[in-house]
Image (cartoon, rainbow, N blue to C red):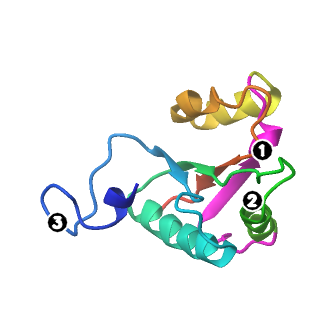
Amino acid sequence: MRALFNQCPHCGSDSLPILGSDTIELNIKQDGPYVDEALDRLTDYLRKCIDLRIKAIVLIHGYGSRGEGGRIKWAIHDALQNNRYADRVDEYHFGEAVAFGGEAYHALLRRRPGLKPYLKRFKEGNAGMTVLLLKSVI
């Protein structure tokens, strides 16, 4: 994902790429950031995704080493529930509530069919991921 948001490793261009999909997966926990770094990273990614006209993000934040929910997961959930990203995120769905084949799963697929390949990993719900539906740029 780093190549998507920084200088192109192939041509050196700083221009944003043209994507073939309106849905992407972002691993916010990659490189093991501290909570504040992860939230700053998410803020930056959201801004850039909107610039790229991305409509849905499958955000991987992990669920903590004990399986109870790590600090990054809870900080992201808290930020979403307290409208920190309300100017960019139209809707969010915590992975544990999006079990494969369930009502929330089918509702998401009706709104964003591009999520189908990503949601297959939500067999019993996946507490380490959150689906973000972004606001449209006018």
Mark 1 element type: loop
Looking at the picture, tell me which residue is in the foreground, 40 or 101: 40
Could you tell me residue 28's position as x and y percent? Answer: 57, 59
Mark 2 element type: helix
Report which residue position mark 3 lands on: 13
Could you tell me residue 136's position as x and y percent? Answer: 51, 58
Marks 1 and 3, the one that precedes in the sequence = 3
Q: Where on the picture, by quarter, is residue 22?
A: top left
Alpha carbon distance from label 1 to label 3: 36 Å
Q: Name the outermost residue toward the right.
A: 68
Report which residue position mark 2 lands on: 73
Q: Give the magenta range.
A: 82-100
* Rendered-image quadrant of the N terminus: bottom left
Q: Residue at x 63, y 62 (%)?
A: 89
Q: Residue at x 52, y 62 (%)?
A: 31
Please say whether residue 31 is visible from this viewpoint.
yes
Which amino acid, mark 3? Ser
Is 19 drawn above or below residue 35 in the view shown? above
> Does residue 115 appear left or right of residue 81 in this picture?
left
Which amino acid, mark 2? Lys
Looking at the picture, tell me which residue is in the foreground, 13 or 28: 28
Question: Viewer-nearest of labels 1 and 3?
Answer: 1
Is 21 drawn above or below residue 34 in the view shown? above
> Does residue 20 appear left or right of residue 134 in this picture?
left
Could you tell me residue 29's position as x and y percent? Answer: 60, 58
Which amino acid, mark 1? Ala
Does 89 lie within the magenta span? yes
Does 54 lie within the magenta span? no
